[in-house]
Amino acid sequence: MSPSAPVPSDAPGDASRPFIELRSVTCGYGQRVILEDISLSVPRGKVVALMGTSGGGKTTVLRLIGRQILPMKGQVLIDGQDMAALDAEGLMAMRRRMGMLFQQGALFTDLTVFENVAFPLREHTKLPEAILRDLVLMKLNAVGLRGARDLMPSQISGGMARRVALARAMALDPELMLYDEPFAGLDPISMGVAARLIRELNDTMGLTTVIVSHDVHETFVIADHVVLVANGRIVAQGTPAEMSASSDPLVKQFVHAEPDGPVRFHHPATDAGHDFGVRG
Amino acid sequence: MMQWLNPANIGLAVRTKLADLGYAARLFVRLLGLLGTTLRRPHLLTEQIFFLGNYSLAIIMVSGLFVGFVLGLQGYYILQRYGSSEALGLMVALSLVRELGPVVAALLFAGRAGTALTAGIGLMKAGEQLAAMEMMGVDPVARVLAPRFWGGVIAMPLLAAVFSAVGIMGGWLVGVVMIGVDPGAFWSQMQGGVEVFADVGNGMLKSLVFGLTVTFVALLQGHECQPTPEGVSLATTRTVVMASLAVLGLDFVLTAMMFSI
């Protein structure tokens, strides 16, 4: 599963427009700016990974794509449509084309595994119970959890919960899958399983995938294109191979997990001599 | 020191409060407007009536019984001074139906069901369940909040009625069975003296208003809490404090209005 050739979004001759496009987006919460002047495009059918340090604004990009927050400046276009211009109904229709996997799975704790996966189908379709049952079991089978259908979310492990959530996100056959830290807190086996599932689903279902992660190893294996976000800006992007070979100090620090570099080990502080009373 | 006296800070505080109030008012109106949507999916509503009503039933009935006992004792003590202890049934029934039933049941409802609502919604928010629902194209206000809201509004008057009925039984047990007040007088005075609209109706109206208040406060606190364990526990505390104060304040307003009509 080695990554394919670089995928520049504006490649000449590439007739199909990118599925997701962020045009110089600035956004934040209240007065605090999280992302500044970000431009990004995600081509159809590709797995694009947003990587970076914690708190660097990666998850905010996902929230922008799902319009859980609105940009202060700039535009977010999904399949050519400006997300900010959609009315409530248009937004709901657009969200039905997306599936999102939340960090901890975000399963409904009062519903069984089966009912969790059935939830979007029950809400958006009027399928007969027998067909609904078959669909749900097929989705659960795809993530290997058909046998866990009657369990409650409290009875399954974190890795299983993530897979149930994946089945639920896939229930309506979305065109776009968004993953928020799909590998965080998983054991190595579950991590490998999750990575393989993400790539396979993307390829077999013809999806477009955006992964937010800081797990270099797993992400580099499955991503076509990696975007490094730090301090609210895109600092580097390229294929995993290009990123690995990069000589940029920040990329090097991130990819090779070096403790100090452009991303400081020390939180900004006053002069140490002053704090410890050893003024020279 | 005296930071808050700074005009800019006062302005900010006022604006934030106004925005919060506006948000709450809009949510309230939305929930009222979602009655039709809620009724179209009756199983979601009945589930909540069961959850909020049935699980509060034990505490409501036990409290009602004890309040009835005490009313029987205290009522007898006062009435026998004036030689009218056979009016005990009327006194117990009027106190419960007009006042104690709706108010005490609402306070207990805030403690039992209100906290469960706040904690439930808060945990759904903290666990990103509400965000997940939004991302599925499902509106959490319509799917999660509205059935709970209307479930609470329907359950509250029923619980208040149960409270009053059990309380009257308690008053009867103490007054008639233990103290020996004439049972015929006990029941007939009650039957003759309690008006359907003026007394029972007013009590029902009160408990309906309390149901709206307590359930809304609980849902708002859960929906607005910080999505962290501390945030949820703080919101739960705020639900009890705010809902109880609102019930007692509204009780005075409603009683005053009912006396003036």
Image: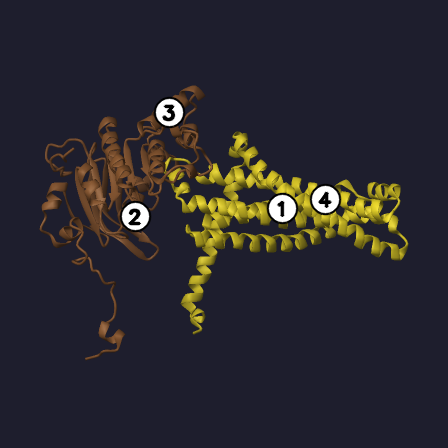
Quote the CA–CA distance across marks 1 and 4.
17 Å
Colour given to chain B in the rendered image: yellow
Residue that numbered label 1 is attached to: B209
Quote the CA–CA distance across marks 2 and 3.
39 Å
In front of the other: label 3 or label 1? Answer: 3
Give how far across and how far down residue A195 sits, in percent: 24, 36
Quote the CA–CA distance across marks 2 and 4.
55 Å
Q: Residue lying farthest bottom? A: A280
User: Which mark is first along the chain, 3 or 2?
Assistant: 2
Question: Quadrant location of the N terminus of chain B?
Answer: bottom left
User: Which amino acid type is shown beneath numbered disc 3?
Assistant: Leu
Is residue A213 shown left or right of residue B122?
left
As drawn, B12 above or below A212: below
Chain coloured brown in this rendering: A
User: Which amino acid type is shown beneath numbered disc 4?
Assistant: Ser
Observer-nearest of A88 and B204: B204
